[in-house]
Image (tube, rainbow, N blue to C red):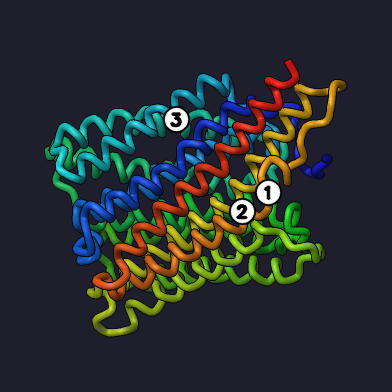
């Protein structure tokens, strides 16, 4: 299989990204367990300690694991720069990130200052290594493409997200600083979701949507200017919020929401113009993701205009569920089903060269398994959205569905690794 625009000569060992991918789904199961433990009262406010723990199980436990693991693979293959000592770098990111996520969730659930101090140290190490390695890589790329621009902006947004997160963690761990906690928390979320997450998805989409989904390319105007404009808007919003100029900040937030909407609409248009008529089970993940991004952006845009909406916790939960579980986790879930089987096939082909053919990708992960897990994911998404409005009726089914979709994804990815290992053992 020859994929234009990709160079696998510098690809890291399969174990480098795989450890992140196999770990991530089980944080969805932990999130479901937390929901079952806390009960429907968690939906009373997004500021409850359990709600904050839940959010970080999603964004650190699932999203950050996959996104950082994917960058270790994407930078050498799609961008052409190597991350030095990939095995050591991966270990220095993966273990602190995993343990730091546990520590942070535990701190929110009652671990006290010591929990935040432990999480602060672990996450500082994991993200510090990741930011140093990835920034050194993307800023020495010989050919600056639209994907490189988006990755640079995404990593800049990640840097801001981490700085804000560490400021908040330091406040809860040591309490020696006088900080505007609410403003910093909101900025931390906006930089993480509208900045780091969206811009990384965009950078990857410029490359993989036309390649894997057989669509026309993104327009050059969008791919060149979307990421820098979003960063400029995020900087402007940060300055306005910290200066307490809230009326002007609302207009910047509206521009950010419009930017998210434009990217989502353009991606949906491209997906509808795909040239390949054969069904692709991962295509539906992209469509659900972009529809969710569009819906959350519309809600973000309308909230300041409708009296009372800004103080409604149910709407905050709806926006969070659509943006995190509907947009980010959907596209990540779909991309995992492209990345993991392909990498297993690629590394098997290299190791079995001249001996026998490796199993094809559909044997490594049958399409039926992908479609079945998508139904579980979609059920979880719809139930979570309904539970945000009617928690008494739909909360527990939503939590169970979340646990099922996370475990199903984890088992599907583990089955690819198991076939990979068995194929290598049979050859020895």
Q: What quarter of the picture does the C terminus occupy?
A: top right
Residue toward you, 210 or 165 = 210
- Residue farthest to the top, as pictured: 428
Neighbour tally class for label 1: few under 14, some 14-19, many 20 plus, Cα within 10 Å: some
Marks 1, 3: nearer the viewer: 1
> 331 or 125: nearer the eye?
331
Do callouts 2 and 1 mark residues in contact (Cβ within 8 Å)?
A: yes
Image coordinates for residue 285, horizontal then vertical, percent: 59, 60
Rendered position, 328 above or below 161: below
Question: Which residue appears at 77% of the width and 25% of the height?
Answer: 350
Disc 1 and disc 3: Cα gap in Å? Answer: 28 Å
Q: Which residue does the image show at 44% across and 59% down from the upper left?
A: 325
Label 2: which secondary element: helix
Q: Which quarter of the picture shows residue 312?
A: bottom left
Residue 370's label in the rendered image is 2
Residue 228 appears anywhere in the view: no
What is the distance, in whole Å, between disc 2 and disc 1 at their CAs? 7 Å
| Direction from residue 309 to residue 127 in the image, left or right | right
Identify the secondary structure beneath mark 3. helix
Point out residue 398 in the picture as x, y percentages from the top left corner.
36, 63
Side of 382 where 57 appears, left or right: left
- Give the number of the disc on residue 94: 3
- Name the residue at the right extreme: 354
Q: Nearer the viewer, residue 143 or 397?
A: 397
Residue marked by disc 1: 366
Choose the circle earlier in sequence order: 2 or 3: 3
């Amino acid at each position: 299989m020859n994929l234009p625009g990709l160079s696998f000569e510098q690809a890291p060992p399969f174990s480098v990204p795989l450890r992140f991918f196999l770990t991530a789904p089980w944080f969805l199961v932990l999130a479901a367990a937390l929901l079952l433990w806390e009960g429907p009262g968690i939906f009373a406010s997004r500021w409850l300690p359990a709600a904050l723990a839940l959010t970080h199980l999603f964004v650190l436990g699932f999203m950050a694991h996959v996104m950082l693991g994917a960058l270790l693979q994407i930078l050498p293959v799609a961008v052409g720069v190597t991350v030095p000592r990939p095995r050591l770098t991966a270990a220095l990111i993966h273990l602190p990130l995993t343990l730091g996520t546990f520590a942070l969730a535990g701190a929110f659930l009652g671990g006290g200052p010591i929990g935040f101090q432990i999480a602060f140290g672990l996450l500082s190490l994991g993200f510090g290594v990741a930011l140093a390695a990835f920034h050194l890589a993307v800023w020495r790329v010989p050919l600056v493409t639209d994907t490189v621009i988006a990755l640079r902006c995404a990593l800049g947004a990640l840097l801001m997200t981490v700085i804000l997160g560490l400021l908040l963690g330091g406040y809860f761990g040591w309490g020696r600083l006088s900080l505007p906690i609410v403003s910093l928390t909101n900025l931390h979320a906006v930089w993480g979701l509208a900045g780091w997450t969206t811009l990384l998805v965009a950078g990857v989409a410029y490359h993989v949507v036309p390649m894997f989904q057989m669509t026309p390319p993104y327009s050059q105007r969008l791919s060149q200017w979307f990421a820098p404009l979003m960063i400029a808007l995020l900087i402007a919003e940060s300055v306005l919020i910290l200066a307490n100029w809230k009326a002007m900040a609302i207009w910047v937030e509206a521009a950010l929401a419009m930017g998210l909407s434009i990217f989502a609409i353009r991606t949906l248009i491209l997906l509808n113009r795909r040239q390949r008529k054969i069904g692709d089970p991962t295509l539906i993940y992209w469509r659900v993701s972009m529809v969710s991004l569009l819906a959350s952006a519309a809600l973000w845009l309308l909230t300041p205009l409708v009296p009372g909406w800004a103080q409604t916790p149910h709407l905050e939960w709806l926006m969070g569920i659509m943006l995190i579980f509907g947009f980010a986790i959907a596209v990540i879930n779909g991309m995992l089903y492209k990345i993991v089987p392909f990498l297993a096939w690629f590394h098997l082909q290299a190791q079995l060269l001249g001996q026998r053919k490796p199993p094809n990708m559909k044997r490594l992960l049958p399409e039926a398994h992908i479609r079945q897990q998508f139904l579980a994911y979609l059920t979880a998404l719809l139930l979570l959205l309904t539970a945000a409005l009617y928690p008494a009726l739909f909360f527990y089914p939503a939590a169970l569905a979340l646990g099922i979709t996370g475990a199903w994804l984890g088992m599907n990815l583990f089955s690819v690794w198991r076939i990979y290992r068995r194929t290598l053992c049979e050859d020895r």
